[in-house]
Amino acid sequence: SQTIHQWPATLVQPVGSPLSLECTVEGTSNPNLYWYRQAAGRGLQLLFYSVGIGQISSEVPQNLSASRPQDRQFILSSKKLLLSDSGFYLCACHGGASSYNEQFFGPGTRLTVL
Amino acid sequence: GNSVTQMEGPVTLSEEAFLTINCTYTATGYPSLFWYVQYPGEGLQLLLKATKADDKGSNKGFEATYRKETTSFHLEKGSVQVSDSAVYFCAPSEGFGNEKLTFGTGTRLTIIP
């Protein structure tokens, strides 16, 4: 089964600083990958998804970007963080044909922008 | 796209009480339906799922039935435990292809001994 790694687990960054969050996946090939954000006390918002290397779709306008340099690596970035970027960031992987639409989630990265 | 309306929280119950968390959805396609659970400080875990009308998903004593006629997928458990305290998310998928999920706002459940 799939295993999703995310790092760092927690991060505190000043406003205006850059950001790089990494997600790697084991146990599957050519997965669909997703980045979600969960703001405090709120639901999950889909930020980006990717169906393959170099293929990124953005769901909401924002100052974040995503990249997929390798099949099982998904990176979330920002050049200049805003206070509103604080939240819990979750990477997810679609399980493939055998799991019938199920998504698997990583442990998340808690980002605090000060 | 899809949308989800989920029961507002927080919900507080005593141990061994009966639980219902309501979820209704709108979808243009024929979605699969999921309940995910998030324990404090963790990512989401799949709790149960149903992939076609009248299917019943079940896991850890929780159940939910895919009701196409009412576009609902209510989560139930007959006797909750303190360890069930978590946030629960209802999520329909969009169907084959990207398999994007639309999440409800989540329902925070607290079980008191």
Image: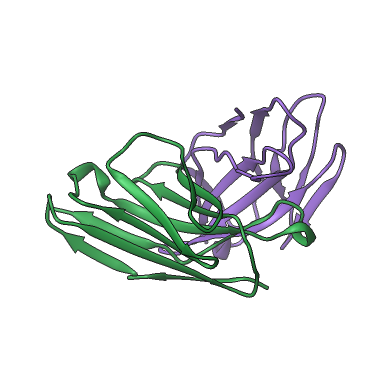
Tell me residue A102's x, y (percent): 68, 55
Tell me residue B101's x, y (percent): 60, 43
Residue B3 in view here:
yes
In this rendering, the answer to whether B48 lies above or below B22 is below
Which quadrant of the view contains residue A63?
Answer: top left
Q: Is residue A76 left or right of residue B21?
A: left
In this rendering, the answer to whether B47 lies above or below B18 is below
Tell me residue A10's x, y (percent): 29, 67
Closer to the camera, A92 or A67? A67
Residue B79 in view here:
no
Q: Is residue B89 left or right of residue A107?
A: right
At x 21%, y 51%, the residue is A79
Give the drawing colour for chain B.
purple
Tell me residue A97's x, y (percent): 77, 57
At x 29%, y 62%, the residue is A20
At x 64%, y 58%, the residue is B46
Closer to the camera, A86 or A59? A59
Closer to the camera, B29 or B41? B29
Q: Is residue A79 left or right of residue B37?
A: left
Closer to the camera, A114 or A5? A5
At x 19%, y 57%, the residue is A18
